[in-house]
Image (cartoon, rainbow, N blue to C red):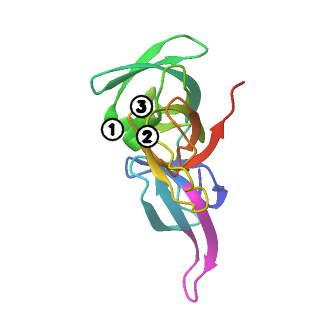
Amino acid sequence: MRASEMRKGQTVKIDGKLYAIVDFQHVKLGKGGAVYQTKLKSLTDGSIQNVRLRAEETVEEAYLDKRTYEYLYSAGSEHILMDTTTYDQITLDDDAFGDGQKYLKPNTRLQVTMYEGKPIVVTLPNTVDLQVTDTPPEIKGATATSQNKPATLETGLVVQVPPFIKVGDVVRVDTRTGEYVTRVKDA
């Protein structure tokens, strides 16, 4: 496609690397022709890059396939996922998840973005509910101060929680920030 046909959110391939178009602006230079100043986000490492393209230049559009997978289990540093429509299983290593593996528990639904049949981006749900396995007991009379305490969750993740949280409670954690959101009431 020509640079003049770019849209925000599209995925393009430049120099063999995949980028998502974050922003672009049509700029008219004093003497030369018009150019597009683009802001691209790398899909492999998340870095932002500014690239200037002439309107007549062509860029290769990359078509990504987003699929819903269910996390099944981990074996060492490998994580087994199942496609929820075809029931095909794939194995991803720790690098595919980054810090996200701390939020994985069986039956968690994930979004996996594929390019040419290879997974490139794993997107976790915004929040997950995890059970508290270890935390110090509540100190009587400490409710007046809002001091948080550490709590170890079922996946080994440690988060800061309010003092009223006890072992066995289920808490909601934001996977983007790693912070406690709320205590989950029994359904």
**Residue to which mark 1 is pinned:** 95
Amino acid marked by disc 3: Thr
Q: Earlier in the sequence, mark 3 or mark 1?
A: 1
Question: Residue at coordinates 57% horizontally, 55% vertically from top-left?
Answer: 141
Residue carrying label 2: 135
Q: Nearer the viewer, mark 3 or mark 1?
A: 3
Numbered circle sitting on residue 155: 3
Question: Residue type at mark 1?
Answer: Asp
Outermost residue, bottom side: 30
Residue 128 coordinates in the image, percent (x, y): 57, 35
Image vertical order of residue 87 relative to residue 107, above or below? above
Query: Can you tell which quarter of the image residue 5 is in?
Result: bottom right
Label 2 neighbour load within 10 Å: few <14, some 14-19, many 20+: many
Q: Left or right? Give the position of 150 relative to 11.
A: left
Q: Secondary structure at mark 1?
A: helix
- Please state which of residues 22 and 167 is positioned toward the viewer in this rendering: 167
Residue nearer the viewer, 172 or 166: 166
First in sequence, mark 3 or 2: give its number.
2
x then y, percent, for residue 60 = 51, 47
Seen from this angle, which residue lies furthest front?
A: 140
Question: Mark 3 to mark 1: distance in Å?
Answer: 18 Å
Looking at the image, residue 74 lies above or below residue 144: above
Q: Nearer the viewer, mark 1 or mark 2?
A: 2
Magenta range: 21-37
- Circles 3 and 1: CB distance less than 8 Å? no
Q: Looking at the picture, how far across and down is residue 159, in whole percent?
A: 46, 47
Q: Is residue 34 highlighted in magenta?
A: yes
Q: Secondary structure at mark 3?
A: loop
